[in-house]
Structures are given as structure tokens and as C-alpha cells.
Image (cartoon, grey):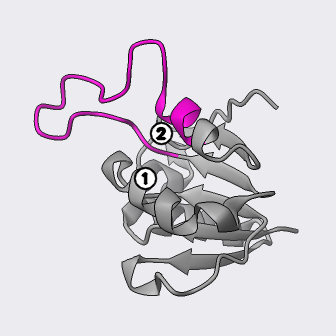
Amino acid sequence: MSHVTIIGTGAMGQAIAVVVTAGGNTVQLLGTADAATPVTGEIVILAVPYPAVAEVLASRGDSLAGRVVVDITNPLDFQTLDSLTVDADSSATAEIAAALPDSRVLKAFNTTFAATIASREVGPVPTTVPIPGDD
């Protein structure tokens, strides 16, 4: 059993919290109003839009050292939705990992939607969440 902190209380954060809890784990769900609340999970899921990641890392980066950090973001240009906001030879997760050298950073949940996570299926097929990392 694990204790998971989810930073972000939107649809994705809430859907992930339901699945994590159903798996027998405990969840700490933190929103913007919880900026002073310490992170307590050994696993931390960044369930915020990519433009908010820099602020999260600036305010909570030190507290993420030694933890597994899961990036769910897609670094899209949210105005046009047609291009990435990271260099072509990089990724959101690579940038987060560089900013958190004492954390183990993974990618997950960015290829599905909150509804398919919450329902645990896509049509007749169970929802699948790839979890890539280099660790």
C-alpha cells in the first residue's frame, strides 16, 4: 500500500484519486488553496496543466526530493493546440526530471481522459495507462 499525493484537484486529479484509493492506497489531494500544506506522499502526481508545472516546482521542488514524481502533462500551446511548448528534442517529463534531480520522474496518464480513468474502460476494453521512465 502506498500514500500518494496528487497536486491538482481538477477532473484528472480527482479521477486518478478515485482509482488510487480503490487500489487500497491513501491519497492526499492538494489544490491551489493548499500551497502551505506539506506533501506527504511517497508518490506525487503532478495533475496540473503544463503551464502550471514551473510554479509547482518552484514552490514545492525541494519537498519532492526522494519521491517518485509522475508527470501527466501534455506541453501543448493551449492557445492554438497545434504545437508543443518544449524543444523538439525534449519533453515535459525530461524538463521536470532536470528540475528535480533527486526525484524519480515518470510519465503516465497523459494518453487518456479523466472519464476513461474513472470508468476504468474504453468501450469494452479496460483502460490502459502506459508508465514510461528511465529508472
Instruction: Classify 46 as above or below 33.
Output: above
Instruction: Classify 38 as above or below 79.
Output: below
Residue at 43 percent of width and 77 percent of height: 31
Of labels 1 and 2, earlier in sequence is 1
Disc 1: which residue? 53
Residue at 51 percent of width and 46 percent of height: 72
Residue type highlighted by circle 2: Asn
**Can residue 107 be seen?**
no
Location of residue 20 in the rendering, given as x and y in whole percent from the top left corner = 68, 65
Q: Is residue 75 magenta?
A: yes
Q: Quadrant of residue 73?
A: top left
Location of residue 28 in the rendering, given as x and y in whole percent from the top left corner = 63, 79
Disc on res. 110: 2
Residue type highlighted by circle 1: Val
**Mark 1 and mark 2: Cα distance apart in space:** 14 Å
Nearer-the-camera pick, 20 or 76: 76
Disc on res. 30: none
Give the side of residue 5 with respect to residue 79, left or right. Answer: right
Q: Are marks 1 and 2 in contact (CB under 8 Å)?
A: no
* Residue sticking out furthest to the top: 89
Residues packed near mark 2 inside 10 Å, few (<14), some (14 to 19) or many (20 plus): some
Location of residue 122 in the rendering, given as x and y in whole percent from the top left corner = 48, 40
Q: Quadrant of residue 96?
A: top right
Q: Secondary structure at mark 2?
A: loop
Magenta stretch bounds: 72-96
